[in-house]
Structure formats: C-alpha cells, structure tokens
C-alpha cells in the first residue's frame, strides 16, 4: 500500500533537500551572506533573511544570497516572499543547479505562478529557466531568441556612480549613450525619447524592438530592447547580461564581463576615463585593483605616495631605499659636494606583480615617493609589456587596445 505524505511532511522533505544544496558552500558571497548563514544554521530565519537581503544588494550577481533568502522565508512559511525570491533566482540564473532547485520549490508552494509566467508573453526568463531545468532532466529544451552573442569574449568597462547606481557607456546600433548597469532588471530598456535622440526609429506603439548592443566590445546582435516610457532611467538588464558572467569592483569602479564559455582573445581592449588631461586606467597590483594615471610615454614602473600604497594593501615597511650612487651628483671639489653618507636617500622601491589588460608581469618596480602629490598613482604601461603586445590608445572612444604580435 503506498504511503501518502501529508502536506507538512512534504514541506519538511522539500526544505530539507533544498537546504542541503548549498549548505556546505566553501565561500560565502560576502560578509552579509556569511552572517546570514550563521543565523540560518541557528534557525533564526527572520534575522537570516534580513542579512541575505543585504547581501543581494551588495553582490546581485551571486546566486547564494537569493537562494538562502528564499529558503529563510520558506522556513518561516512566508510563501509570498519565498516565491518572489525563488522566481528571481530562476530568472537571473537559468540552467544552474540553484535555479533547478528553486523551480522544484515553486512547483510545491506556487505552481500556478510558474504556469502563468510560462504562458505569459513577458515570461521569457521563466520560460528559459524551465526549459533548462527540463533539459537537465533529459527533455528537449525550448529555445528563445535572445539574439546572437558576438564581439570579443571578455572586456573591462568603467562606471560612474550616480547615488547607488552604476552608470556605464553603451552603444546601441553603433551610437553611444549611457545606461545603468542593473543585473536586477530583467529587461534592457531605454525611453523612446532617448532612442529618438540616437536617431533610432521605433515603430509607433511598439513596446519592444531588436537591436545591436555593444558593451565595451562584447556584442549582442538582434537583442530585445524594451521601450520604457515610465520615466525610469535606461538600464542594461538580464536580457543582455544572461549570456555573460560579470564582476563589479565598487572600489576601483570597473566591471569585468566575460562571455559564458568564452576564452581569452589574442586581442582585447579596456576602457579608460579622463581626469583633466590625464588618462585614468584600472591596474591590478598584487591582485588588487587600483585607479592610476596611465603614462604611455614609457617609464620603469609605477610611482605613488605612502598613503596610496597602503590603500591598495602594499607594505611600505617592506620597501627598500635605493642606494646612492657616489658617481652621481656633485663630485669632490664642487662647492655643493657632500659625502655619499650625508646625501638624502632616494625614494623607497619594492617589486610588485602587475596586471594591465591582458598583460601581466612579476617584479615590476614600484617607487614609494612621499612627495608624489598626484591624485592617483602613476603607471607606465611599458613596464609590463614583454614586447609581445602592441598597445594603442583610442582617444576618441576612450579605449586602450591590445593586440598580440
């Protein structure tokens, strides 16, 4: 005789299976997620949910906070909020194990929600996720046309802050404008007025059209673009971003974007910003990114003051003073001559590992100069070029392009 499980028993089994999914994750999304997990394990689900919600704001590209926020609400039997978070997980991370588990949960607590979204004209991301989950189980997947991904497989773009928004430059059909980089938005959207300013004609009454979107060299052709006349700012959302992985560095203000399944290119490019006449680029020093003034004329490495060095994690106490060359400067007999022992020592120096675009080198000289008064450290790109790269600065497009010889 088959055993019939009660609804509460099904609930217990389901949430037990779901909580086992990521409970042993080795790395937490951020400090909020780490604290949330501690509370989750203590069964303080209401407090845990609050921390996971903060983590979602902090690292919206990570699936873990969405999953455990949903599970925390699920354990509290707040099915409305649980449904909301599971649905967000399905839409933003289609085809992942987290998404498939979220679909399993939704099938239990809100099956009508999935059915309605799957049938609705605007339920594209849900359809894609359901198709991916179906494919993982051996059924044929339903493909939805979101355009073709072209261009270079990876790039780094810079952004500007407008309150809490990250504002980027984007090209639509070859014309440049600005938009908010918003992984939480399902659609990529622009206002009709903004599109008209770019000389892009949209059929009257149309709420969506297909166009080419170029984000720092990664391109999506025939991509769906929503016409949003609600007064909201333009956004680059998941209808473009779902084909890429991305990492946002809020400190150095850049975003790394990489095509899913893509490989490193022989040629690539990075964006730069301007500060007066200075070109400001992002440079990684010992694995930590920092904004620096780019010196394209040469030089032996980089120069910064002690405060700037400490801000990127360099141990200035480990830097060594460069020995004074007795053959340099005034010599004996010159009224300005002083003994080498009495001469002021030069700036401190230390070797560092530097990555700039696709170029990387260990042992680059970093001078710690306390009199360096620049707003940013100074960096020489030639210091990391082993001679196998051609580096071109496109001042019109604010790009630095690297081509392998």
Image (tube, rainbow, N blue to C red):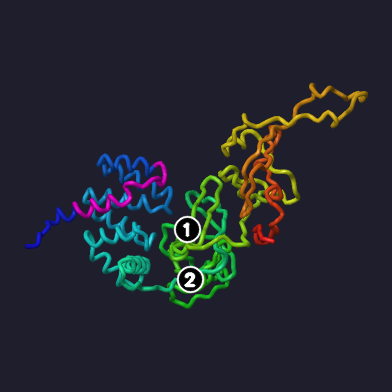
Residue 393 falls inside the magenta stretch: no
Q: Nearer the viewer, residue 270 or 73?
A: 270
Most extreme residue toward the right is 333
Disc 2: which residue:
223
Left or right of residue 312: residue 396: right
Query: Looking at the image, which residue is at 65% across and 38% down?
Result: 351
Residue 231, visible in the rendered structure: no
Name the residue at 41% across, 52% down. 62
The location of residue 359, given as percent across then percent down, is 64, 53
Answer left or right for 164 relative to 130: right
* Residue 20 on the magenta span: yes
- What secondary structure is the stretch in magenta mostly built from? helix
Judge left or right: residue 162 versus residue 403.
left
Q: Is residue 64 above or below residue 130?
A: above
Q: Quick check: can you spot residue 389?
A: yes
Specify which label sits upstream in the sequence, 2 or 1.
Answer: 2
Extent of the magenta region: 12-31
- Compared with 399, 208 (above or below) is below
Nearer the observer, 245 or 215: 245
- Crowding around mark 1 (Cα neighbors within 10 Å: few <14, some 14 to 19, many 20+) is some
| Residue nearest the observer in this picture, 260 or 297 | 260
**394 left or right, relative to 241:** right
Disc number placed over residue 245 in the picture, else none: 1
Q: Is residue 273 above or below residue 113?
A: above
């Amino acid at each position: 005789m088959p055993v019939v499980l009660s609804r509460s028993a099904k609930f217990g089994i389901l949430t037990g299976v779901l909580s086992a999914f990521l409970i042993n994750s080795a790395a937490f999304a951020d400090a909020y997620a780490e604290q949330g997990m501690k509370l989750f394990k203590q069964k303080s689900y209401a407090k845990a949910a609050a921390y996971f919600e903060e983590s979602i704001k902090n690292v919206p590209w990570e699936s873990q906070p969405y999953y455990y926020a949903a599970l925390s609400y699920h354990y509290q039997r707040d099915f409305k909020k649980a449904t909301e978070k599971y649905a967000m997980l399905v839409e933003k991370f289609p085809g992942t194990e987290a998404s498939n588990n979220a679909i399993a949960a939704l099938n239990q607590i809100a099956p009508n929600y999935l059915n309605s979204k799957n049938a609705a004209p605007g339920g594209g991301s849900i359809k894609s996720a359901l198709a991916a989950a179906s494919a993982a189980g051996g059924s044929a997947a339903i493909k939805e046309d979101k355009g073709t991904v072209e261009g270079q497989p990876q790039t780094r773009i810079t952004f500007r802050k407008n309150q809490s928004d990250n504002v980027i430059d984007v090209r639509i059909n070859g014309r440049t404008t600005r938009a908010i980089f918003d992984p939480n938005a399902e659609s990529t959207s622009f206002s009709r007025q903004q599109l008209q300013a770019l000389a892009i004609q949209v059929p009257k009454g149309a709420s969506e059209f297909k166009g080419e979107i170029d984000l720092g060299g990664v391109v999506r052709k025939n991509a769906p673009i929503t016409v949003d006349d609600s007064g909201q700012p333009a956004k680059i959302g998941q209808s473009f971003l779902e084909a890429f992985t991305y990492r946002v560095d809020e400190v150095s203000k850049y975003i790394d974007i990489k095509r899913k399944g893509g490989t490193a290119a022989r040629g690539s490019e990075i964006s730069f910003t301007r500060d007066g006449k200075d070109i400001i680029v992002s440079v990684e020093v010992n694995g930590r990114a920092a904004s620096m003034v780019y010196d394209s004329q040469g030089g032996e490495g980089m120069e910064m003051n002690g405060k700037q060095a400490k801000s990127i994690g360099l141990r200035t106490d480990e830097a060594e003073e460069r020995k004074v060359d007795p053959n340099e400067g005034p010599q004996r007999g010159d009224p300005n001559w002083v003994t080498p022992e009495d001469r002021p020592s030069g700036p401190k120096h230390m070797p560092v590992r530097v990555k700039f675009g696709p170029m990387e080198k260990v042992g680059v000289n970093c001078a710690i100069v306390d009199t360096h008064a620049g707003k940013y450290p100074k960096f020489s790109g030639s210091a990391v070029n082993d001679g196998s790269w051609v580096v071109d600065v496109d001042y019109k497009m604010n790009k630095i392009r690297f081509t392998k010889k």
